[in-house]
Amino acid sequence: MEEVVLMKGNEAIAHAAVRCGADGYFGYPITPQSEVLETLADLKPWETTGMVVLQAESEVAAINMVYGGAGSGKMVLTSSSSPGVSLKQEGISYLAGAELPCLIVNVMRGGPGLGTIQPSQADYFQTVKGGGHGDYRLIALAPASVQEMADFVELGFELAFKYRNPAIILADGVIGQMMEKVVLPAQKPRRTEQELIEQCPWASTGRTNGRKPNIITSLELQPDAMEQNNIRFQAKYKLIEENEVRYEEINCEDADYLIVAFGSMARIGQKAMEIARESGIKVGILRPITLWPFPTKAIAKYANQVKGMLSLELNAGQMVEDIRLAVNGKVKVEHFGRLGGIVPDPDEIVAALKEKLI
């Protein structure tokens, strides 16, 4: 039975993880995402669903616990914020190289360094371009509401297991800390051991059934074999790009100018769009829901329609590079963002739109 409650985005992550049948969470506190672990500790799912919740001794330990759980076919997740996710990068690369499904949550704060606990979107490069080593990709979902924070937990696990690839929810501090009404899904049972074996024949479960046990590793010492692994990875990434692009369009059909924004900035950008239209400027907004795979084709189709595009981001200009690649010089693309945890108001965005594009 669905349940409507008022909660923070971080709290929604925790509730959704329990309700979608997750097997384990491993994390470490860091602002502005600490409520994920705190909420799980309060819910005590180990007493109801059997879900393991563990505060690790560090972010490095947490991501390696995720590696172990994912290697056994379990639905496991971790959460952190920007500096903590930086510490997890080696483990994330290992997970991608071993083709293990898991869910990672990053509620971004300002940087670089320790930076600020205020919201930011400056981890776009780290997530979309690959912060760890090697040629790998993360399926990246960018929620713009508390409801999507909840919804994307199940979606993230679904995509991760479908493609045997880590998925990440890339939220910013605004979405993690804000409170909204959210519809929580009905409780799903955790998979039985038999279901796990049937759904994840690749998993290392300790049961051989007379066969050679599965070995989970990202190590391959033979160059030819490692190249074949990478060729297989790239084929999988191409398949994801062909089938899993998600985005939202608002008032784009007659737009003269296009705002491209994700997360909290898409919400503020939508209000800026409304203000601009009230003054006679036809503005549309395109919101990438998957930052990878990026909606390149969706943005490119507007290159011959609009007079300019504004990349709206809480950073110094990161997604703007992918927008420019998408339009291939056919239309002017500018960036507007605030730094240091400062969130712009809609009037600032309208002013930037006029200054940079009109």
Image (cartoon, rainbow, N blue to C red):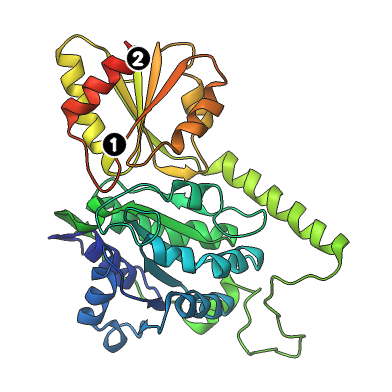
Q: Quadrant of the C terminus?
A: top left
Q: Is residue 207 above or below residue 162?
A: below
Residue 110 x/y as whole percent: 32, 53
As rendered, which of 282 and 71 lies closer to the eye?
282
Q: Is residue 338 above or below residue 108?
A: above
Residue that carries the numbered disc 1 in the rendered image: 266
Who's the residue at 49% across and 34% down the image? 295
In the image, taking residue 133 as reference, residue 297 lies left or right, namely left
| Foreground label between 2 and 1 | 2
Who's the residue at 22% across and 22% down the image? 350
Residue 206 x/y as whole percent: 63, 90
**SS type, badge 2:** helix
Residue that carries the numbered disc 2 in the rendered image: 357
Q: Is residue 152 above or below residue 316?
A: below
Q: Quadrant of the N terminus?
A: bottom left
Q: Amino acid at mark 2?
A: Leu
Crowd tier of the residue under label 2, counting other residues whose Cα lies within 10 Å: few below 14, some 14–19, many 20 or above: some
**SS type, badge 1:** helix
Residue 77 is marked as none
Q: Is residue 4 above or below residue 329?
A: below
Who's the residue at 59% across and 39% down the image? 242
Q: Amino acid at mark 1?
A: Ala
